[in-house]
Image (cartoon, rainbow, N blue to C red):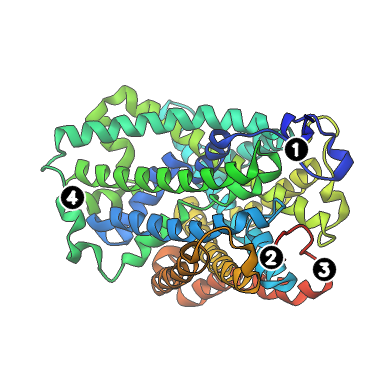
Amino acid sequence: MTCDPARTGHQDPRVDGRLHGHLGTGAIVFMVIAAAAPLTVVGGNVPLAVAGGNGVGAPVGFLLAAVVLLVFSVGFVALTPHVREAGAFFSYVTAGLGSRAGLGTAFTALVAYTAIQVGVYGYAGWALDDLVVFFGGPEASWWVYSFAMLAVVAVLGFRHIELSAKVLGVALVLEIAVVVVLDAVVFARGGRSGVVVETFAPENVFTPHIGVAVLFALTGFIGFEATAVFRDEARDPDRTVPRATYLAVVVIGVFYALSCWALVTGAGAADAVAVAQRTLDGEGNLLLDTTSEYLGPVLRDVVQVLLVSSLFACVLSFHNVLARYQFSLAGKGVLPARLGRTHPRHASPSTASLVQTVTAALVLAVLALAGLDPLVGVFGSMAGVATVGMVLLLTTTSVAVLVFFARNPGARRRGPGATRVAPAAAVLGLLACLWLVLSNFTLVTGSGVAVSAVLALLAPAAFVLGFALGGRYRLQERTTGT
């Protein structure tokens, strides 16, 4: 019996240029759910979905997004054993559609994840300032706090991934616990006017603005592909990645839907939209006000602190994912070779991490100098860019699954339901989601048609650029069944 050094974590990363570790299913799920930032979504995305979307029917938007992503995950998991590198979507697309589409997908992911990370930095700056002022401290510009958080993320992202996993795990447990308690108390007391069953009435679900709710629901799932990004650092990737993927989607979807429903119930069917709108106007806070009413002022203060820790966990997780994208691309010669180096002591993609920090800082500086509002101008618009990119990534990946198994029938370890039916259904569902998102895009960005069109085209433009350059690189090197 031999010892696999990749599983024990003792492999020197300089030997083969890959990352190593022994993360289990729980650790990876922590990373993924932390990237989804449960408290951030409940405190930020939910008011946006309720006020700008389909009102009391917004919780169903989160369920719809979860169902579509579960269907997508069936094909994603079926292809996982045949993709032997930690490139996530771009490795999957390369396996099925070739280097051009693969690099286009990689560029799209870089744009999407950078956008949502910068958006969350804006939200975090606003939340930190609100926290400091609430406890009697001085008021400051949101970007001051955003850059302070960016500096801390830079330090942790430079070190080994297991340190980040521990930090994210502690923050995640606390924020989920307090929201679960809030949900339970709201439903136990019945809200202001009873449990809002109108949430599931078709006339409240299928409104003209349901696309806004679906968009912010999908935004809440951004980062769940990290189950594959961390495959080189997983204890048993062929088993850990599928388990973590399904578990992450189910936990995230149920948690978001129930929490959104609880906040709607807590405010009451008649007042939910108005209360959510006051949150966007800075005149109230749907999450904090509901917590104060049902759990008391002390836990209200606790939630406000945890909201900041949730935002921190979110940007740290996105930082780790982006650094690993750059690390993988550098290993293929697409990005400078220095980005593919690992730290001799921390076994982390340290150079890629530093570059990612500089990139985020530059984009954040541009938005700050433009004088944008941190919630609508920064978080809202960047969430829109990221969601368009995410849907494009998911759709292309599903097409790649179909093509891969059509070309390699001998590689099918699962039946036609996983290799043909589910991926095809995912493509149709994702195209429907994209139409809903784009048809309501100006409501999300808070800008005119011209600006919204430019923002919506950023992710597709990145794909086209990558596709044009993709013929110059051999990205398909570590797949099986081809």
Pointers 2 and 3 in contact (C-beta within 8 Å): no
**Residue behind mark 1:** 20
For this orientation, the residue located farthest to the top is 298
Q: Nearer the viewer, residue 274 or 17?
A: 17
Q: Name the residue located 54 percent from the left edge and 67 percent from the top edge.
A: 398
Secondary structure of residue under mark 2: helix
Q: Which mark is residue 95?
A: 2
Mark 4 vs mark 2: in front: 2
> Dot 4: what SS?
loop
Residue type at mark 2: give it.
Ala
* Residue type at numbered disc 1: His
Task: Residue 407 in the image: state x and y as whole percent.
Answer: 65, 73
Give the number of the mark in front: 4 or 1: 1
Q: Secondary structure at mark 3?
A: loop
**Residue 472 on image: x %, y %:** 83, 72
Inspect this view and state whether residue 341 appears.
yes
Distance from the alpha carbon under mark 3 to that under mark 4: 56 Å
Q: Quadrant of the C terminus?
A: bottom right
Reading the image, the residue beneath label 3 is: 473
Q: Amino acid at mark 4?
A: Asp
**Sooner in the amino-acid sequence: mark 4 or mark 2:** 2
> How far apart, in angstroms, are the residues tagged by discs 4 and 1?
51 Å
* x, y percent for residue 109: 63, 60
Residue beneath the point at 46% across and 64% down = 417
- Neighbours of disc 2 within 10 Å: few (<14), some (14-19), many (20+): many
Q: Nearer the viewer, mark 3 or mark 4?
A: 3
Sequence-wise, the earlier of marks 2 and 3 is 2
Q: In front here: 289 or 12?
A: 12
Q: Give 379 or 236, whichever is nearer the viewer.
A: 236
Instruction: Write down the residue under mark 4.
Output: 271
**Mark 3, other Cα within 10 Å: few <14 / some 14–19 / many ≥20:** few
